[in-house]
Image (tube, rainbow, N blue to C red):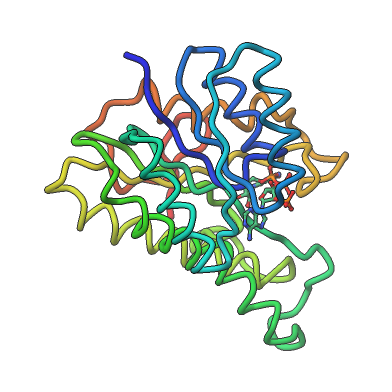
Amino acid sequence: MKKTILITGANKGIGFEMATQFGKLGHHIILTARDETRLEQAIQKLMEGQIKVEGLMMDVADEESIRNASEKFVQLNLKLDVLINNAAILDKEDRSILQENEDLLLKSLTTNSYGALRVVRAFLPFMKNPSRIINISSEGGSMTDPIGGWAPAYCVSKSMLNAITRHLAAELMPRNISVNAVCPGWVRTDMGGAGATRPVEIGAETPVWLATEAPQTLTGCFFRDKKQIPW
Ligand code: NAP
C-alpha cells in the first residue's frame, strides 16, 4: 500500500536519502525544510526522478513555523501514514558540558528534542489509525554506552528525544500509532563528515524499513541496523 510520509529537515543528508528511497518505492513524500531555496532545490531533484513530492517550509526550532506548516498541510487534504523527525543540529566543537554555553544546550534541545515533540503535537490530528512516528536519534544519546567527551549538548538532546519516544509510544498506543527511535550509525553527511564509516544509503535503510516493512506492533523501541538496541 502506498503511504504518505512526512520528513523533517529533509533537504539533504539522511532525510533527503529517505525521501529518495521512499519515492522509489512509490510512496508520497511531504518534504519539509527550514530554508525556501534549499527546499525548492530538493523538491526539484526528487521530481526529476519522477517522485511524488510536496514541499512544506518548517523550521522545527520555531513553534510558529511548525504551526504554519500544519495549517498549510490542511490544504493538501492528506492524512499521514508516517511522520519522521529527522531534523537536527550538532556542534562538533562542543566537548564539555561544564564549559559549553547555555545557548548551545538550549538550541540543541529546542531543535533536536522539543522540536520533534512540537511537530508530533502539530501533526497528530492528521495521523491515520494505524500510523507510525519515527524519531531519528543517535547512540550518542544512549544511557548505556560510555558517556562523556563528545558533543554533550547533542548527546543530551538525543537522550531527551529517546525519552520522548518512550512517552509518546505509551500515550499513542491506544490510537494505534507506533513510535520508535533509530540510530542510523556514523554516516557520511554534512553532520557525520567525510570520514564517517557508512554511506547515506545505509543510514536511511533502518528508518525506511521501520516505516514500510516492520510490524506495526513494534513500538517504544530503539533500533540500529533493523535490530533493537538498548537505550
Ligand atoms: P545533515 O546532513 O546535517 O542534515 C540535517 C538536516 O536537518 C538538514 O536538512 C538541516 O537543514 C535540517 N535542520 C537542522 N535544523 C533544522 C531546523 N531547525 N528546522 C528544520 N530543519 C533543520 O545531518 P544528517 O547526518 O543527515 O542527520 C540526519 C539525522 O540523523 C539527525 O537527526 C542526526 O542527529 C541523525 N544522526 C546522524 C548521524 C551521522 O553520522 N550523520 C549519526 C547519528 C544520528 P539545513 O540544510 O537548513 O541546515
**Viewed as shown, does residue 216 lie left or right of 148?**
left
* Vertical comparison of 91 with 11: above or below: below
Q: Quadrant of residue 49?
A: top right
Task: Find residue 190 and report its horizontal and vertical position in percent.
Answer: 81, 45
**Viewed as shown, does residue 213 lie left or right of 216?**
right
- The C terminus, quarter of image: bottom left
Task: Find residue 185 and report its horizontal and vertical position in percent.
Answer: 64, 40
Front in this rendered view, residue 184 or 133: 133
- Labels in figure, total: 0
**Viewed as shown, does residue 44 lie left or right of 33?**
right
Task: Find residue 129 and report its horizontal and vertical position in percent.
Answer: 19, 36
> Can you name the residue that lies furthest to the left here?
174
Residue drawn at the location 53% of the way across and 19% of the way down? 52
* Vertical comparison of 218 with 205: above or below: below
Task: Find residue 169 and report its horizontal and vertical position in percent.
Answer: 27, 52
> Can you name the residue that lies furthest to the front here?
75
Residue drawn at the location 30% of the way across and 48% of the way down? 220
